Image (cartoon, helix red, strand yellow):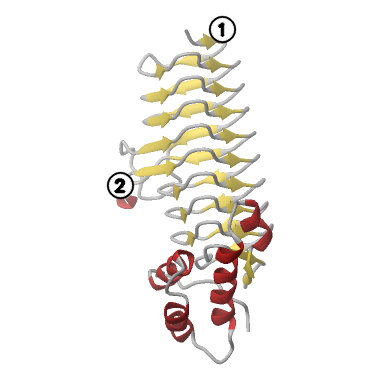
């Protein structure tokens, strides 16, 4: 049985899983599905169509599944899909998708979204991510698994943040942020090489870390263009899956990638 505070307003179209806890002054509106053992804290509003995976926590005052902040949106039935075991702290905002962006905003599982984080329309966010306070995504941003977005950072629309990437506090990312690397700074942001400590904490072996460092040294060489560096990485680090991921990320970029400033 769900535990629902008497001040909460629950739309009859909503579906609540087993052992869900709904706090004071919560509003759940439209076609919303809340998975088992979720906690929806005081003053949170969830609008549908939205689905939320099991054991997800909204601490308080969150706005989840609101319409996208996009001129093209005309009330279309777009969606928000959230995975399991996420934690959304105070005043986090997450918006549904737009038709032109595919119609769905997605967030994976096991993420931590600190106070005032914002996930805009049509973003695709992976698993085990960390958003510090006021970490902000514009529309259509893709964030890879286990990436970290620092406090007061903003990622420009249509950019990508690679797997295991670390974006430092106060960063303005207007191009793609490389997997495994530390990207820090505002206009221009710079890449400062592998997030060595973070990768070690994530269980990367010394061999894997060495390969990523070797790839970064090639990308950072002033006598090589990015294309030449990528070719060298392929030739010298062919046995490294991490190096291949880095190469594929760079080659598939449409906005360009953030490297060290000249």
Q: What is the quadrant of the C terminus in the image?
A: bottom right
**Identity of the residue drawn at 32% across and 44% down:** 103
Give the image quarter of residue 11. top left
Residue 99's label in the rendered image is 2
Label 2: how many residues lie within 10 Å, few (<14), some (14-19) or many (20+)? Answer: some
**Is 251 on the left or on the right of 223, as rendered?**
left
Residue 232 x/y as whole percent = 46, 83
The count of marks equals 2
The one nearer the camera, 17 or 217, is: 217
| As drawn, 122 above or below 63 | below
Badge 1 is on which residue?
6
**Identity of the residue drawn at 50% across and 40% down:** 94
| As drawn, 231 above or below 116 | below
Residue 15 x/y as whole percent = 38, 18
| As drawn, 199 above or below 76 | below
**SS class, disc 2:** helix
Residue 247 x/y as whole percent = 43, 72
Label 1: how many residues lie within 10 Å, few (<14), some (14-19) or many (20+)? Answer: few
Q: Earlier in the sequence, mark 2 or mark 1?
A: 1
Residue 144 x/y as whole percent = 48, 54
The one nearer the camera, 29 or 229, is: 229
| As drawn, 241 above or below 75 | below
The one nearer the camera, 186 or 164, is: 164
**Identity of the residue drawn at 46% across and 22% down:** 28
Residue 85's label in the rendered image is none
């Amino acid at each position: 049985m769900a535990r629902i505070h008497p001040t909460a307003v629950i739309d009859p179209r909503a579906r609540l899983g087993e052992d869900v806890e709904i706090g004071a002054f919560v509003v759940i509106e439209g076609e919303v599905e809340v998975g088992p053992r979720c906690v929806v804290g005081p003053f949170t509003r969830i609008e549908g169509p939205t689905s939320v995976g099991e054991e997800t926590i909204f601490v308080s005052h969150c706005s989840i599944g609101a319409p996208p902040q996009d001129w093209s949106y005309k009330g279309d039935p777009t969606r928000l899909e959230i995975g399991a075991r996420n934690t959304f702290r105070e005043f986090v905002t997450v918006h549904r998708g737009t038709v032109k962006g595919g119609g769905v905003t997605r967030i994976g599982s096991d993420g931590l979204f600190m106070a005032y984080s914002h996930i805009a329309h049509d973003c695709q966010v992976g698993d085990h991510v960390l958003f510090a306070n006021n970490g902000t995504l514009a529309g259509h941003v893709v964030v890879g698994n286990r990436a970290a977005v620092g406090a007061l950072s903003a990622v420009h629309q249509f950019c990508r943040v690679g797997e295991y990437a670390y974006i430092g506090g106060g960063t303005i990312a207007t191009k793609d942020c490389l997997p495994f690397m530390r990207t820090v700074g505002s206009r221009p942001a710079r890449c400062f090489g592998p997030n060595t400590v973070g990768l070690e904490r994530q269980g990367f072996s010394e061999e894997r870390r060495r390969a990523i460092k070797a790839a970064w040294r090639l990308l950072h060489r002033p006598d090589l263009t990015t294309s030449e560096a990528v070719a060298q990485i392929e030739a010298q680090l062919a046995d490294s899956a991490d190096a291949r991921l880095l190469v594929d990320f760079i080659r598939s970029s449409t906005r360009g990638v953030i490297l060290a400033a000249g």
